[in-house]
Amino acid sequence: MKRRVGILISGRGSNMTALIDHAAQPDYPAEIALVVANRADAAGLSAAAQRGIATQVIASRDFGANRAAHEAALDAALRAAGCEFLCLAGYMRLLTPWLVQRWSGRMINIHPSLLPVFPGLDTHQRALAAGVKIHGCTVHLVTDGMDAGPILAQAAVPVLPHDNESTLAARVLVQEHLLYPAALAALITGMSVPAPAESGLVNPCISG
Ligand code: GRF
């Protein structure tokens, strides 16, 4: 029986779309029960609706500074939809310890760097500035620290000599779309994330 999963987004929703498309496969252990955006203009809402997924806007701006009330509304919507797991997919709000605790062990996030390096924003730009030769993405459990929870899975890509922020971001994003569905399935089934060839991991390489 498929487990019910909710997704929180704020924008484009390409990782959300990857999760929805994987979950449409009969042998995938999850179904996407609800997508919630905290912004009415999140482009991912229409992508989800086109795929027949229930969507809801719970706009953070309607709640002003009252983060607790906003999160209570999110939590109620997710529970009403029967969600047992929660995926953050480009959700651009920090969560309070209350929501983190409520979904502890069942809420995951994808971050576009090989954590613990480059938590926070502008990860591709920072990776280029630091001159790293390997970059990538991480799926981790959400805890109170920003981008700091236990790592579930990672995929690496080479940084190539002529990369700029957008070429590097695009190379990482291809891996995000493979890694996130694999990591969610692994969390749900209690298995480890598939072997490198399937999850898109590459061997270390030297460039530059
Ligand atoms: C992705 O790079 C993800 O790793 C980060 O935010 C971006 C969201 O992109 N957390 P999308 O909305 O999934 O296309």
Image (cartoon, rainbow, N blue to C red):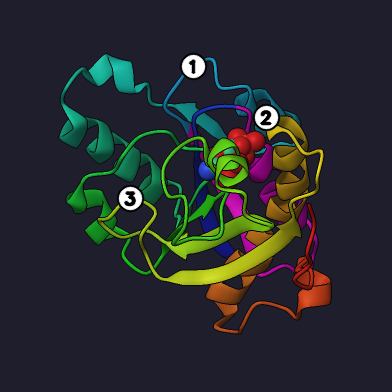
Q: Kindly identify the amino acid type of the residue bearing the numbered disc 2.
A: Ala
Residue drawn at x 57%, y 40% as measured from the top left: 129
Residue drawn at x 48%, y 35% as measured from the top left: 36
Q: CA distance from mark 1 to mark 2?
A: 13 Å
Tell me which numbered mark, 2 or 3, is placed earlier along the sequence.
2
What percent of the width, then of the height, locates residue 32?
60, 51
Give the quadrant of ligand 1. Answer: top right
Q: Kindly identify the amino acid type of the residue bearing the numbered disc 3.
A: Met
Residue underneath mark 1: 40
Label 1 sits on a secondary structure element that is loop
Residue underneath mark 3: 146
Residues packed near mark 2 inside 10 Å, few (<14), some (14 to 19) or many (20 plus): few
Task: Look at the numbered disc 2 and say if its residue's Cβ is closer than 8 Å to ligand 1.
Answer: no
Residues packed near mark 3 inside 10 Å, few (<14), some (14 to 19) or many (20 plus): few
What percent of the width, then of the height, locates residue 67?
20, 31
Residue underneath mark 2: 49
Residue 4 on the magenta segment: no
